[in-house]
Amino acid sequence: MTLHAELDLTRGAFHLTATVDVPAGGVLAILGPNGSGKSTVLGCLAGLLDPDTARITLAGRILTDSTRGVRVPPHQRGVGLLAQDPLLFPHLSVLDNVAFGPRSRGARRAEAARVARHWLAEVGAAELAGRGPAQLSGGQAQRVAVARALAGEPGLLLLDEPLAALDVDAAPALRGLLRRVLRAEARTAVLVTHDPLDALTLADQVAVLSGGRVVEAGPTRAVLSAPRTAFTARIAGLNLVEGTATGTGLRTAAGEPITGMLAEDAVPGEPAVAVFAPGTVAVYPEGQAPVGSPRNTVPATVGTLEPHGSLVRLRATGAGWAAGIAADLTPAAVAELGLDPGSPVRLAIKATTVLIHPAP
Amino acid sequence: MTLHAELDLTRGAFHLTATVDVPAGGVLAILGPNGSGKSTVLGCLAGLLDPDTARITLAGRILTDSTRGVRVPPHQRGVGLLAQDPLLFPHLSVLDNVAFGPRSRGARRAEAARVARHWLAEVGAAELAGRGPAQLSGGQAQRVAVARALAGEPGLLLLDEPLAALDVDAAPALRGLLRRVLRAEARTAVLVTHDPLDALTLADQVAVLSGGRVVEAGPTRAVLSAPRTAFTARIAGLNLVEGTATGTGLRTAAGEPITGMLAEDAVPGEPAVAVFAPGTVAVYPEGQAPVGSPRNTVPATVGTLEPHGSLVRLRATGAGWAAGIAADLTPAAVAELGLDPGSPVRLAIKATTVLIHPAP
Amino acid sequence: AGHGDRTVTVFAAASLTESFGEIVDEFEAEHPRTRVRLNLAGSSRLAQQIVAGAPADVFASASEATMRTVTEAGRVEGEPRVFATNELAIAVAPGNPHGITSFADLAGAGLTVVVCAPQVPCGAATERVERASGVTLRPASEEQDVKAVLTKVQAGEADAGVVYGTDVRAAGDQVSTVRFPEAGRAVNHYPIAVLTGTGQPEPARWFTEFVLGPAVRKQLNGAGFGAP
Amino acid sequence: MPWPLWIPAALGLALVVLPVAGLLLRADLARLPELLTTPAALHALRLSLLTAALSTVACLLLGVPLAVVLARARLRGVRLLRAVVLLPLVLPPVVGGLALLYLLGRNGFLGYLLEVTAGVRVPFTTAAVVIAQTFVAMPFLVVSLEGALRGAGDAYERVAATLGARPLTTFRRVTVPLLLPAIGSGAVLSFARALGEFGATITFAGSLQGVTRTLPLEVYTQAEVDTDSAVALALLLVAVAVLVIAIARPRAWEGAR
Amino acid sequence: MPWPLWIPAALGLALVVLPVAGLLLRADLARLPELLTTPAALHALRLSLLTAALSTVACLLLGVPLAVVLARARLRGVRLLRAVVLLPLVLPPVVGGLALLYLLGRNGFLGYLLEVTAGVRVPFTTAAVVIAQTFVAMPFLVVSLEGALRGAGDAYERVAATLGARPLTTFRRVTVPLLLPAIGSGAVLSFARALGEFGATITFAGSLQGVTRTLPLEVYTQAEVDTDSAVALALLLVAVAVLVIAIARPRAWEGAR
Ligand SMILES: Nc1ncnc2c1ncn2[C@@H]1O[C@H](COP(=O)(O)OP(=O)(O)OP(=O)(O)O)[C@@H](O)[C@H]1O
Ligand SMILES: Nc1ncnc2c1ncn2[C@@H]1O[C@H](COP(=O)(O)OP(=O)(O)OP(=O)(O)O)[C@@H](O)[C@H]1O
Ligand code: MOO
Ligand SMILES: [Mg+2]
Ligand SMILES: [Mg+2]
């Protein structure tokens, strides 16, 4: 289900000009400030908005082609949308809300209810099945909306801030669920989010929108680890190290262990990434290798040193997984340690600041 | 505007029994999982829900007293509510939405528009004034809703997840705005949030709800730094150090400097707090004082060592600001360093993981 | 209607409602295998329906003018025949509190008088009486039909109304009647006719003859109608 | 609710209640049972209930789709169609009946066609009563539904489409259920209008006891003879209507969500 | 919109349009100008527009508050009141007129009071026409609004209250504007019903040219002598009504948000 979309739309003073590509089974995360056009892109893909000119193809099938006057109606697109507002049908029970998609696709009543129960259980809302939407809390409604979108089993799934309004236990649980669904079932999906962690853990492609234009796009890791715009830099700039999950963290392809905190759904033996912020990376002069609590220390060489806001961002080079790691330091620290490109250093990262997620 | 509320309400299978106290000019943060009753509490305070039995007083005035049959209607309570759903009036422009509160309190048209423009500018939505609510993005609508709630200038302000749906630039900006409004103008407020940072930076009291009951309550710092329930522990457990903001961080009362990243609205010379997670605190044996990038190192003594999930939480004692600081370590690190209560250690915290916020 | 029964459909003017109700019962007693269906409405509406092809076998109208429209549309078999007449009378509150004794009294000041509109038969008759007697009425309302005039008098809203004698009688003791001589200048005729294009020419003819017969004549007289 | 609203609301209620109450006081209540159990009255009552129910069903079957089309279709001529639907509302019922007679009578275009092809004659049958009632009552349903549809917007219908529901499924499972309170009011309006229908019925269907003489026509007929019994019949009509509506109105129509 | 809906919608439309079209075809269009410019016709037209407009205003002033009270008040008797409001809907208009006459006539309770205290007599005046029209038309507005109100819920009214708006302010600035599409439909219904009112008017107000003889009454009167001219008048009524509604309907009533 490869998605290719070229969109052009004007709404009042707002202009959207964007090209969106998602390979079959891929997940694209769209990031961007409020009002940058993220929901508008999803609306166009779902067929709810009519772009001025557009060409949208899904798995080779033309969904919209303004030059040829083609415009497949929303219900024939096989595109599911979880909108920003849950909009549960007020006249249906929670169960019937979730069963609506399967029923619409022709499932029998009992079968649809079974599917609905399954997805409700997956989002941790099984006990809400008999309630009416008016009897749910904000977070409960959001979970049910996610279940409803997933139960639709569309060829292309569009998710607009799916983890909004969720509590600190529900958000990671749902993130894990989404990852399982999107990755394991190789569903093609577009995900709008404000949280770079969602992008890192769920998406293999990222597009950053700003003022209706795509200002950055590419593989998640490349975009988020080397942001080219201030906005992306603020939300991202995380370090990623790929490898295989272990009981205590991750082992890189070269066999080096990294200790970290395993996400709930990280399974030892499966591909995984270690994620940590540049701000948590401590830098020591090569000679002074400290023996302290930080589990992860690795020798490296200073590659570049660049200003990053009020800080200095050090980009390391080196043999092992240190290559490419970014560390944020105060200018005082850089001065005091006498760091220069080429200086040998040792990086130290506490295991408690390293998150191990299954690879997207 | 001291708020005192004893609430008792049954809604289907859900029972709420809560006592809520906020001193005049204080801000109470309510935390808790989805469906724990946070919004229900706000609904009762605003007079939109009818508790089975309740006694609510605001600045000595009885708002609800079920034993005496008193029930002041919502519009006479002087209680403003920012609900979880923005619910902007669809027939009014953004400006008129925000001007609705002032107008209802008797302001002239021009005066109300002036006030509305002021608040719209404050939330960064000045350019949206002429739009209709249907022409806003999700985050824009949320900002306008915040402006509308603030423009109402109620004696008691209730905010239900005010920073939801906001982007990474808008959220801190609005958080700063709320802090200014709530603290500078000494408004009494109750704030529902899933983000402990909101609680830490905006509230002086915290109540944690779970299943309709208050499971923890007290001063923010006390509750969040020493959580007594698993839920609170997961959302909080942050380290806080009080002092006065400086150009590069904070100076404690004893004069010790802490280097950190200043929040936008932290003003040197003003009271401030340094906030950092226990996971970012590295521990070194006393002898091996490392000389590396971490700006903040402090001698301390191991106070307690307690299991904390799969980790060990070390609680330090000591003379300076090290007293009470928590550090999360892997069991391997504890074993390797041979830590025991009473061991002298040195704590190291990278400046880039320390946030300096104005004191709430 | 049981097996073998024949049904004849009679369109009759609304003012005949009470009389025809009884006439039909008598007719059916005499012709046990024939049933009569009555369609009761204003004469002009009935005429409209007949012209539009209504399945009517007999038309008993309250005015010759309406019968004429049906004749002109070619739906009357033979010639319509008059079976009753009717004269105007003044309806007043019971006991005649305003002491009205003549048609001219109606022009007196301070009286609220209602009449029929000149477009309907009773109104046309009233106009003729006015012209003949030189009395000009200033009515508070020109009503749609006799019934509306009577209602106003019954409710006490009007002090007097000009209606047909038969109608006053039907209203019983709720109104009193004042007869006046000029009424003879505007006698209203009730024609009846068998209609063409019906499936029941025979019983239709029986019914018409029955209505024109002496038994019915007496019955109609009793209801206040005059002889043709 | 603002208390000053009670003043005009009470006035409005008084305008409705006082006259009816006055009628009740005037009615000869002792004679009521006798008046109301005559065969003519019972025939008329049965016929009225039957035809009003049938025409309400017809109004729903034709009117709900028509309202949806008028409210949602984005065609050019829709504004005109919206005005056209109002025609029977303003047409004096008698003229409406005449129009039906012109169309479906023996000399009418459709009437001729029906008689020749199917041997069916519509006027002066119970079917004619139902048609006349539907003609005058449907616009009430359509106009009130259209207002509700526009007020409600189409957000939920869009959600249904993204879940793969075909338009007819969406209509059946989303549009109609959400519209139920309005459909309820609309059905009540049509039922009431149909039950009270007089002018179009007497013109198009005539006044034949047991076949086309509904309760309002019986009231009219009785009025020629005896005003008291006419008023009693009218009260019967009112009581029946209010009962039917109060009892038959399903919970869902109440808009209790 | 699902296309199968077009079938019943088209049928419904045909039921409305065909008879009226037939009427138009039958009308002697050449004579129309002449028929329509008689003083009687012009008087009747002017009177009809005036009284229908006035009674629509009265319906709005009394009916909107009444609908809000019925939909929102949480009193015990409200269910009963809701049924009571339906009374004039089902009362045959002539009986309704009778009821008004019994109440406001010379011998009526209120009528006597008015005559004695203020020297005012209501029947046979233009005011009586307006009252009769309001009596029959208001329930249409109330019932259709009530349905819309229940469908809409009160979320925005609650928001207004938390912003400190008094109930009357909320009513004026939130309830009414949000209800505008429904109020629009309701006003159209009342206006149409008032414009077509016949039975109650003739019974309560009588029929005097220029004072109480509205267009429907003129149509009835004319129908007795000349069906053609009656039909022409009816068409005039219809044209005027549709024009007034199409032109006067404010944009806001369309529900375009
Ligand atoms: N109907 C409309 N008319 C005019 N402008 C509109 C309309 N709807 C949305 N917009 C504008 O289009 C822009 C894009 O909106 P969109 O909802 O796509 O933003 P978004 O990226 O999803 O933002 P958020 O993160 O706040 O949800 C916004 O600036 C918004 O104000
Ligand atoms: N009308 C109702 N009938 C029955 N139960 C209800 C009703 N409304 C809410 N509830 C239940 O009450 C509980 C509290 O709801 P509330 O909205 O206060 O939760 P919350 O703490 O605000 O959650 P969230 O973080 O998801 O917004 C929930 O379990 C919810 O399911
Ligand atoms: O035990 Mo450490 O200090 O989190 O690596
Ligand atoms: Mg959005
Ligand atoms: Mg909530």
Image (spheres, coloured by chain):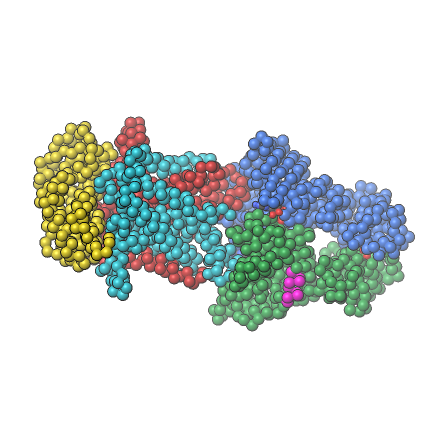
Chain colours: A green, B blue, C yellow, D cyan, E red
Which residue shows up at 28% across the image and 39% down it?
Answer: D35
In the image: residue A116, left or right of residue E224: right
User: In terms of secondary structure, what is the magenta stretch mainly?
Assistant: helix
Magenta stretch: includes residue A183 = yes
Q: Could you tell me residue D223's position as x and y percent?
A: 24, 41
**B32 versus A50 height, above or below:** above
The answer to whether residue E231 is magenta is no
User: In front: D124, or B167?
Assistant: D124
- Locate ligand 3 by image quadrant: bottom right
Q: Quadrant of residue C96?
A: top left
Of residue C190 and residue C132, the one placed in the foreground of this image is: C190
**Which residue is at the front of the view, A92 or A297?**
A92
Q: Is residue E170 visible to the viewer in this orientation of the structure?
A: yes
Q: Can residue B99 be seen by looking at this rendering? A: no
* Percent x, y of residue A154: 57, 64
Residue at (49% x, 69% y) in the render:
A70
Q: Position of residue A118 (x, y in %)?
A: 61, 58
Instruction: Residue at 77% x, 43% y: name it.
Output: B242
Q: Which stretch did the figure color magenta?
A: A178-186
Viewer-nearest residue: E250 or D5:
D5
Outermost residue, top side: E117
Q: Quadrant of the N terminus of chain E?
A: bottom left
Q: Is residue E8 above or below residue D92?
A: below
Residue at the extreme right of the image, as rendered: B287
Q: Residue at x 30, y 41 (%)?
A: D37
Q: Is residue C87 left or right of residue E19?
A: left
